[in-house]
Amino acid sequence: MERQILQSLQSWPWQPSQSGRWKQDFGPKANFKKQQVKIPETWEGFPSCSHQLLELLRGKTETLRDFEAVECLSLWYDSDRGASHALHVDDLWLWGQRIVGVSLQSPSIFTFFDPVNSVCVRVPLPQRSAYLINGRVRVDWQHGILAEDIWGPRVAMTFRELTEPMAQTELGRQALERAKLPGARGFQRSRVCGGCFGLFLL
Ligand SMILES: O=C(O)CCC(=O)C(=O)O
């Protein structure tokens, strides 16, 4: 399945992102400073491989049974560019409680940091594993990937859901519908600590 996913992602162009990363972003576009969100007209759903992957992940734990992703963000960490992901908390006004991600192509380490108690926890992310961040870890702890923990090209796919109030808005309903479309085609060719952190091997 890993090879199939990586091949399918190659149908899409990688856009330059921050800190030596490249990205492919499928979902609503947010202005995080203004807390505004819109649905790009050109967004035709997730890459088709992600639907099979999400189905697999929903079957791994009861916590994900009703998980409805509205964003699929693929990140390619380019070791040659010293790629990393600074410690952060995913935006709370837009993204819901559960964040799910898979690690492909090479292993890494997730660094979690509790700024209130200055505690750091490091969790290995094996190649072909999936994680779930939920509860207090999602809200109170920062997470990130240090440059020293990228040892080769790594592709991460992260799936996010909307907050409940957002999901109930007209825009939220439209985003959910769009995310469920059978699968967008690449246009290149056609044109820890309370809460929960779970790790699954795919
Ligand atoms: O690379 C990863 O698996 C984590 C990605 C992440 O933290 C994010 O997209 O907010």
Image (cartoon, grey):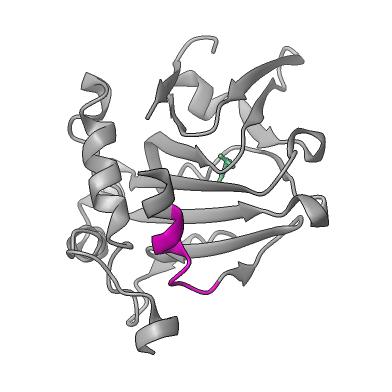
Q: Is residue 134 above or below residue 173?
A: above
Q: State the residue in front, 36 or 95.
A: 95
> Outermost residue, bottom direction?
191
- In this rendering, would 172 be left or right of 117? left
Q: Is residue 118 above or below residue 182?
A: above
Residue beneath the point at 26% across and 65% down: 171
Q: Position of residue 88 (x, y in %)?
A: 65, 39
Residue 23 lies in the magenta-colored region? no
Q: Is residue 24 above or below residue 129?
A: below
Residue beneath the point at 74% across and 45% down: 84
Q: Position of residue 86 (x, y in %)?
A: 73, 42
> Outermost residue, front direction?
3
Question: Split into 4 quadrants, where in the image is the C terminus?
Answer: top left
Residue beneath the point at 55% across and 27% down: 126
Q: State the residue in front, 46 or 168.
A: 46
Q: Position of residue 150 (x, y in %)?
A: 73, 39
Q: Position of residue 100 (x, y in %)?
A: 41, 36
Looking at the rendering, the stretch of residues picked out in magenta corresponds to 6-13
- In this rendering, would 102 be left or right of 68? right
Question: Split into 4 quadrants, where in the image is the N terminus?
Answer: top left
Residue 8 figure quarter: bottom left
- In this rendering, would 16 be left or right of 2? right
Residue beneath the point at 21% across and 20% down: 62
